[in-house]
Structures are given as C-alpha cells and as structure tokens.
Image: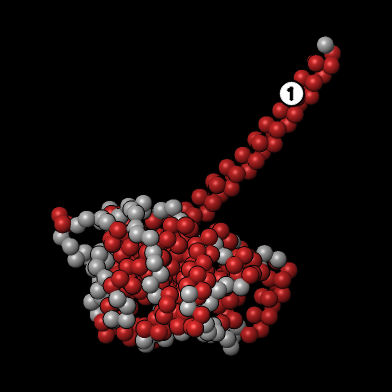
Amino acid sequence: MSSTILVMSVQTLLLSAALAVFGVIATIEISKTIHQKMRLRRDKAASAPHRGEESTWNELTEHHRPIRDSEPDEFTAGPHERLLAICAPYSLCRRDPWDRLACSDLDGTRTMLSLDWGVRSRTDLLSRIYWLITSGHRSGFNAERARWVDTSLAEAERHELRESSDSSSDASETLWRLGRMLNNDRDIRNVDFSAWDLVRAAMLTRCGFALGWLTEDETWDTLTILDRGLRERYRSWTQMSESFRLAHWYWNSKSGKDEHFNDLHDLNRSLVLLSTDGPWGIIDWGIDTPEPSFLILDDLLDTGVAMPLGAGERKRATQWERWVDDQVILRRQHRPQHFGTRVEQHHRFTKRA
C-alpha cells in the first residue's frame, strides 16, 4: 500500500513539474509573440506619414491606384490572375494594368532593364531570372545574418567597415545593415527575404514577355515556378507583403529622409495592394495554379548558366530550391552534350532595381 502511495506521489510531482515547465515555456512564447507584435506596430507607426505629409501620402495613393484592363463585371479571379498578382507591386508603380501581361511603356521598360539590371537580350534576361530563383540577394543577406550572430565578430567587422565607409558605398551600406541586424530593427533577424527576389523575378518575367524575349507559354510557366516558391515560404499575401517590404528596406540600406520616404512609399503600396480594390485583396491566396514545366531551363543549360548545386548549397537550400535543383539534374542527364561551366553572375544591381 505504502509503495503504491509513493509511486502516486512521484507521478504527481513529475506531473506538477512538467506542467510548471510547460507553463514557463508557454509564458515565454506568449511574451515573445506580444513583443513581436508591439515591435511591428511601432515600425509601421514610424513608417506612417508625419504631420504635414498628408499631401505626399495622397499623391502616393493616387500613384499606386490599381488599374485593371478588364471591366469589373467581367473580371474573374483565376490561375492567370493569381500569377499576375505576383507582379503587382511593379505594375502599380509603372501605371500598368496589373491583370494583363503586356507593359504600357516598352521604351521605358527596355531602358529600365538595361540600366538597372544589365539586361539587353533574352540570354541576359534568363540569366538574371535564374539568379533570382536560385540565389538572389537573399543568399547574401542570410549569410550576413548568420555571420553577425557572433557579436564579437560583428563588432570587429564594424570596426573595419567604419575605416572604409567614407570612400566606399558598399562598405557604408554593409555597415548600415550590420547595425540594423545587431539591433534587430524591425525584427529583421526573423524576416524571410525570399519575396524580395521572387517578386522581382516575376517583374522581369513580365517585362521579358512584353519585349518579345519570352513566349507566352514560357512566361506563364516561369510565373508558376515563382508562385510555387512563394507558396512554400508564405501563407498569405499579407505575410508575403511584409517580407517584401522589409527586405526592400534592408536592401536599400539608407537612413534619414531617403529612408523615411521609401518607408512611406512602400507602406502605401502595401496597403493599396491589400485593400479591397487591390490585387492582393481581390485574389485569393489559395487559388490553384498549374504544375510548372520549367520551359526556360533548356536554354539555361545551353548557355551554362544552370548548374547543379554543390553539396553545401544543397544542404542549405529550401525545399523549393531543391526542387529547382532536381529539375536541373534531371534535365542535364538527358542533355550531356550541353554541359558547361557556370557563368559568372553579377549580383550588384542599381538601387532602382
């Protein structure tokens, strides 16, 4: 009898201890969630228009006013519209109807691609899109985040950057990002940078079609690839929008008046996109899209741009990035005559990109 009571007492103690530990963990998690929400509210408040900026805000709202090619009573939110919505941040800024592939200003589009991206041909375009799909700026940003976890190394790097920041814009921008990461400004340590690369890749894809460098089938198929990647990383337009906005802020690497105006612009654009009249308010996130075929991959293999990931790269890759790598490996097995060496990618584009 006494042994039974003893066992029951031990079990009660263990249960009490487990509940206590669970309570502590739950309290910590709730506290972290509340802290993150408070931080996000504070960051959005800092980005909002200051007193006297109402006219600027109204001008931005008009600038970002969504334009649709189809009449409201004829509009149907289907797979094509779901894919076009990925390009919408740039469609709004360029005053293009967001629900069609074509671009209104072909000369401006050609100039933008040439000056901001170094893209002057189909080959250039495919190379840039593939870089954004497989690496993009997120690769460097993730490496910075991992490197600066060690504060002693971060401080040593900060000291070196300060010595060259006056004469080097790259050093100055890296120094800015280091400070933001160390302070965890806008919760930047937890931002998934994928949206910044994949939304821009969608913009390039749409521009490529407009200039005749991609067929319509290639365009829809490439947008489907990008859609697959975005769905893996995010669960809603709102989540993707926040990641895109914060990654743009981190990439822009500017303080002062420029930073505030960019914040104002990006917050306004996000709110318009997510409004009841905006593409991301109209199009349901869960609309099904076709399975991609990776139609542009053959040309990427021909030019030596598409190559399998190394073992270390593969280990760090997301599930979607490994899917892309699988397609490269499988397609190469059927095209041995086209093996080549990886073309050097230039990762620095102008700040207008």
- Placement of 164 over or under 60, stated as above or below: below
**Where on the picture, by quarter, is residue 139?**
bottom right
**For this rendering, which residue is in front, 211 or 36?**
211
Give, as a three-letter code, the residue at label 1: Thr
- Which residue appears at 66% of the width and 36% of the height? 22
- Which residue appears at 63% of the width and 85% of the height? 164
Left/right of residue 78 with respect to residue 318 in the rendered view: left
Dot 1: few (<14), some (14–19), or many (≥20) neighbours within 10 Å? few
- Which residue appears at 32% of the width and 78% of the height? 214
Asked if one can make out residue 268 in the rendered structure from this viewpoint, the answer is no
From the top left corner, tell me how far across and down residue 343 is, in percent: 52, 85
Q: Which residue is mark 1?
A: 12
**Where on the picture, by quarter, is residue 80?**
bottom left
- Which residue appears at 74% of the width and 23% of the height? 12
Asked if one can make out residue 91 in the rendered structure from this viewpoint, the answer is yes
**For this rendering, which residue is in front, 1 or 181?**
1
- Placement of 108 over or under 250, stated as above or below: below
Instruction: Give the residue furthest to the top.
Output: 1
Location of the C terminus by quadrant is bottom left
Location of the N terminus by quadrant is top right
**Where on the picture, by quarter, is residue 124?**
bottom left
Instruction: Give the residue furthest to the right.
Output: 2
**For this rendering, which residue is in front, 258 or 137?**
137
> Which coloring applies here?
secondary structure
From the top left corner, tell me how far across and down residue 53 is, in percent: 34, 66
From the top left corner, tell me how far across and down residue 239 is, in percent: 44, 55
Number of marks present in the image shown: 1
From the top left corner, tell me how far across and down residue 29 is, in percent: 60, 44
